[in-house]
Amino acid sequence: MAEIATNSRPEDGTRQGAGIRALLEEPSVARGVFWSLLGVAALLTVLRPWLPDGLVRIPEALLMPWRDWIDAAFDFVAFDLGLIHVTRFLSGILEFVLDAVANILYGRARWPRFEALPWTVVASVAAITGYALGGWRLSLLAGGTFVWAAVIGQWKWTMETMSVILVAAPLGFTIGLLIGIWCWKSKRVEETVKPLLLVLQVLPFFSYLLPAVIFFKVGPTAATVATVAYSLPPMILMTTLGLKKVSPEVVEAGKMAGCSRWQMLRYVYLPSARTEILVGLNQVIMLCLAMVVLTAAIGMPGLGAKLLEAMGSFKLGRSFEIGITIVLLAVVLDRLSKAWVVKQPEHFEKGTPWWKRNIFPIMGVAAFVILYLVARGVAEMDPMPFDEVSFPSWLVGIMDEVHRKESLSQGREFDASIKAFLSLDWVNAITYAIRYVVNVYFLIPTEKALLYLPTPAVIFVITAIAYRIGGVIPGILALIFFSIVAQLGYWDRAMLTLHSVFMATFIALLLGVPMAIYSVRKEKRAKFMILLCDTFQTFPSYVYLLPAVMLFGISPVTVIISILIYTMVPVIRYTVEGLRNVPPELTEAADMSGATRWQKLTKVQLPLALPTMAVGLNQALVFAFFMVIIAEFIGTRDLGQEMRRTLAGTNLGWNFVLGFSVVFMALTFDIAINAWAEKRRKLLGLD
Amino acid sequence: MTDAPVISCRNVWKLFGPNPKQYLAQMSPGRSYEDIRADGYIAGVKDVSLDVGRGEMLVIMGLSGSGKSTLVRCLSRLHDITGGAIEVEGQDIMALPEKELIELRRSKMGMVFQSFGLLPHRTVLENVAFPLEMRGQDRHTRRERALEVINLVGLDGREDYFPRELSGGQQQRVGIARSLAIEPDIWFLDEPFSALDPLIRREMQDEFLRLQEMLGKTIVFITHDFDEALRLADRIAIMKDGAVEQCDTPDKIVLDPQTPYVRKFTEEIEKARVVHANVLAGPVNGAVIEGEAIPGHMTIQQLARQLVNDPRDILPVADKSGKVTGVMPRQKALDILLGDAANG
């Protein structure tokens, strides 16, 4: 018993801390603290004209030289410790692999010199893979996408993008799997990695790019590294989750079969966690695609670069076509990998011949060889003067490569018709009106107000809100995090970023929640909505800029609209999900109590759906923080614009100061909302 | 049961909690399950001592949470015990290094699980061959042996199926086949039939008895179903709160429950179905043996018609070979059959 007594003694210390925490969580105290924080903020705002400058914004003199410190730290790690030599060496290997893949896909004129694969080969192998995994519909989708890319004249760009994905996705998968296994094996590693992943998930992608460029070479190499880093978190999380979920009896069965540790992992754990691991792979692929498109910013050629270029020169038709290719590619990759997740092995009847058991690989190889020979070999065996090409040899030629002149791209015509449509009086009137109203009555006043607020007032308000919804710890973290943001020295730009995020998310809620409520009235409609959201969610974020730019040109409204479209997806999705998962007994009980539809919605369904909706809101905010930085491509004046500038140089300190301004803001909301959702969930006894 | 026991437990403890070893070392003797829980520990297995003889089937019976699954996992060292000692074939298994433990499992132990524990990505054949693969047997021998046990459990023709393509009963047959593949000496079965519906359960019990007749393994069988225990067991150990309340033959458990808990369990049981004639028989002691002897290995219920109609007061009881081993007062048997006269 003595042991127990001594064991419990150190707890008394923490109990005191817990006592303070409990006191601060007391409803009456919480209310008091909340209102007094708001009161102080209001007072500061009212008194602003008479406040000393030091209370309005942190004076320059008091800002720490974060940039120099970070630079110094990086220089130390990179040059004094020699990390840069390691990474440069690795980038040599990576470049070789990338070149090899690029050669196969689109014939890059570098060693190892392969002839580029004819597009017909790629498309037919994709179609057969689609058929093997998900039947003829997936086959059509997969094959059709590549046919579209070739016929519309975007083959080379598509292959440039694909070549990075083909290298980055397996790399991200492997590294993520290994780290995931490590996290599962060691609690300490998991505890270290988890918060890091949280930061990585909200780190703006420009902050992935610059280190990648500095440590690895500009172009595809850096693009690959940034892409891999970006795709890691979900893979790690899914691997750990899957391994933890393996049924204990299966584990015991493995042990009783006399598995050694390696055999346990290889034959029992990993195969049993197959589903989660493959879901992780799906996420890796999707994030890779989203990221590769964005790496245009650091000189990565491909669909992203062309889209950026076309949008920059306002070639709407062309950019629309590229957008379609990107979207198709995303949907195909998503559906293929998801089909693989749900594909379960099935036995063959006894006596099935060998070729029948392996029909798909055989078909794949056959299509590969035949089409390759036809498109390549035959064409070369039968050289013809260019001007008198016969139909068969033209056909063979086009099976190899669709030349620019032969492509069916309608970019210019399309361009003209979109522009004609947009310049129609009524269309113009509508878009102008929206732009004017939103801008003048909504964006400009709120933006001015936010910039007018003294820094401490903003910090207090956010702290008060985080404390009120999330509890003591989220409140304290909000105070610390926003103080750091103020200290990092880009307060006004940070406020502009925050403003765009808030406005877009606010409108997304305003539009998305009613839409979700409407759609759950009928089961069929709800299912359709979920499918729609799932599909939209696979689109690389970059594509969302397109419709906004098309309709509203280059303006602050466009920025808000593009964030809005992107953030509406999680808002709708989670609201539908939350409402649909309200237990039917409860809605039936409400019906039997004689509740009207409105009463049922407000008194039963919404309160129960709120925790799930909060998760959606949280995701919407994270998405918004991501998108607002990307929206820099349209033109913004916030952190994103400044970050983009850092990419031109090698000023890592500058880049990171900006990046972490975003991270700390995003984390504040993430932590507070998640804490609230969890508390609420427990209170309601959900899951 | 003449030679040394195959499995022997002495004062086995398994505690769950923050620092079980230390707690057990300084714990005062005689603390109850509740006392231990108040100290922040759960007694999964509480001071258990029992032996399992060669070829014997010991059934461990108890409600959920009584520690029976924990106990069997201690016997196979899936759990490391907190105190006491477990010997398997004379070897202290807690002292075995990992390598030898793996070797022991690869050569001597088989286990069947409640929810089957099959590997979902492997076919029936590959699942059954799994333990053989782990010990490095070549593909051909593996396949041959696996097919042999698959035939034994009556799954021939299903070798290429995946677990999820089979019914629950069939899946458990795979589990049984897998546990038999390495020809284990000791067979652990953790509620093997609980997840099956009653009709299939009955069928599988018959199947299991047939296998046991054929193979004669040493068996530790876990169940929460008293009927199942009575049907299968040589001996039953009844557990409650981690401790063994009584470990005896079914007849003795029914006739002579040692604790109130066991009594409560046996109350509802129809004793005549359990009690065998030879258990009721006393020594001959010069009593006059007349007429034909009754077979001692049959239950009173099986003998009911004969017992009711027989005019003799004292009945000779014979063993399987026909040799008279004792005599049984008819009244004693009728009391069991019809209930005590005193109790109406």
Image (tube, rainbow, N blue to C red):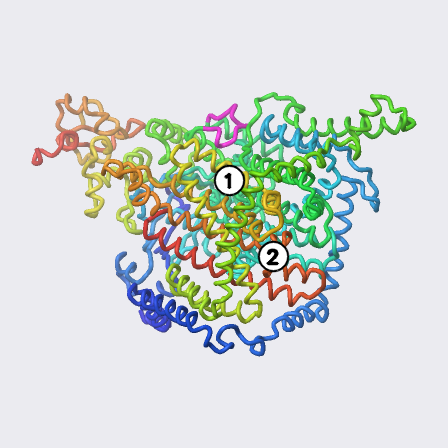
What secondary structure is the stretch in magenta mostly built from? Answer: loop
Secondary structure at numbered mark 1: helix
Residue A380 in percent (x, y) is at 88, 29
Location of residue A400 by image quarter: top right
Of the residues shown, which amino acid type is indicated by label 1? Cys
Report the magenta residues as a range. Answer: B154-166
Of the two numbered discs 1 and 2 on the same chain, state the one appearing first in sequence. 1
Residue A567 inside the magenta-drawn segment:
no
- Is the residue marked by circle 2 packed among few (<14), some (14-19), or many (20+) residues within 10 Å? many
Going by the image, does A141 lie left or right of A455? right
Residue at 17% from the left image edge and 34% from the top image edge: B286
Residue A611 in percent (x, y) is at 39, 50
Of the residues shown, which amino acid type is indicated by label 2? Thr
For the residue pair A210 and A32, the one nearer the viewer reads as A32
Location of residue B41 by image quarter: bottom left
For the residue pair A664 and B71, the one nearer the viewer reads as A664
Residue B278 in percent (x, y) is at 24, 33
Determine the chain carrying the residue at label 2: A
Residue B273 in percent (x, y) is at 23, 30
Work out whether A112 lies above or below B153. below
Residue at 30% from the left image edge and 65% from the top image edge: A26
Quarter placement of the N terminus of chain A: bottom left
Number of numbered discs overlaid on the protein picture: 2
For the residue pair A428 and B134, the one nearer the viewer reads as A428
> Is there one chain holding both mark 1 and mark 2?
yes
Q: CA distance from mark 1 to mark 2?
A: 27 Å
Determine the chain carrying the residue at label 1: A
* Residue, disc 1: A533
Secondary structure at numbered mark 2: loop
* Residue, disc 2: A636
